[in-house]
Image (cartoon, rainbow, N blue to C red):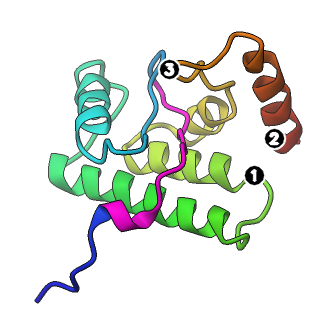
Amino acid sequence: MGSGHTPDQDGGGPFPVRGALPGMTVCRPGSYDAFPLADLRAGVRQKRFKVASEAAAMDAITGTCVHAMRRIATGQAPAGHATDAAELVLRALGMDPGEAAEVARRPLPPLEGEAPQAQPARAAAARRRAK
């Protein structure tokens, strides 16, 4: 029996989780399926991810991202929580732990429509959070 709860009620701010492929982001607002699924499939094709079930992998990605967003939005997350969540997702997808840790700490790619002058400030903020 459903609760009447929909993914749209989970909040809508941008929460890109660092990905293992160039330009990959695991969670984007309004893209609970399309973007992460395409990135998951690309990672499997490139042998970066090893998953037994595409559906279970998507549940792991979406569930982790939604709950991490909620924890961050409500102020319950410790410093570095987004990076820790990204590393966890990458490891869950079968990436080597050392590589997942390194990839999760890479600077994020620019957001679509982001003003070029905002990119250095966002990158500096990400470096400060990673420390």
Mark 3 vs mark 2: in front? 3
Dot 3: within a 10 Å radius of its alpha carbon, few (fewer than 14), some, or many (20 or more) residues?
A: few
- For the residue pair 1 and 43, the one nearer the viewer reads as 1
Going by the image, does 126 lie left or right of 64? Answer: right
**For the residue marked with disc 1, what is the amino acid?**
Gly
Q: For the residue marked with disc 3, what is the amino acid?
A: Glu
Marks 1 & 2, CB-CB < 8 Å contact: yes
| SS state under label 3 | loop
Q: Position of residue 111 (x, y in %)?
A: 55, 23
Q: What amino acid type is highlighted by mark number 2?
A: Ala
3 or 2: tag closer to the N-terminus:
3
Local crowd size for mark 1, using a 10 Å CA cut-off: few (<14), some (14–19), many (≥20) = some
Region of the chain picked out in magenta, as a range: 8-20
- Where is residue 121? Give x, y as percent: 83, 24
Q: How far is the residue under mark 1 from the one under mark 2?
A: 6 Å
Foreground: disc 3 or disc 1? 3
75, above or below 99, in the image: below
The part of the image, by quadrant, that contains residue 59 is bottom left
Q: Label 2: which residue? A: 130
Report how far apart the C-alphas of labels 3 and 1 lie in the structure: 23 Å
Direction from residue 7 to residue 101 in the image, left or right = right
Q: Which residue is mark 3?
A: 112
* Label 2 crowd (10 A; few <14 / some 14-19 / many >=20): some
Residue 95 appearing in the image:
yes
Assign the C terminus to one quadrant of the image. top right
Location of mark 1 (residue): 80
Vertical comparison of 75 with 109: above or below: below
Residue lying at 56% horizontally and 42% vertically, measured from the top left: 97
**First-in-chain label (1 vs 2):** 1
In reply to whether residue 109 is colored magenta, the answer given is: no
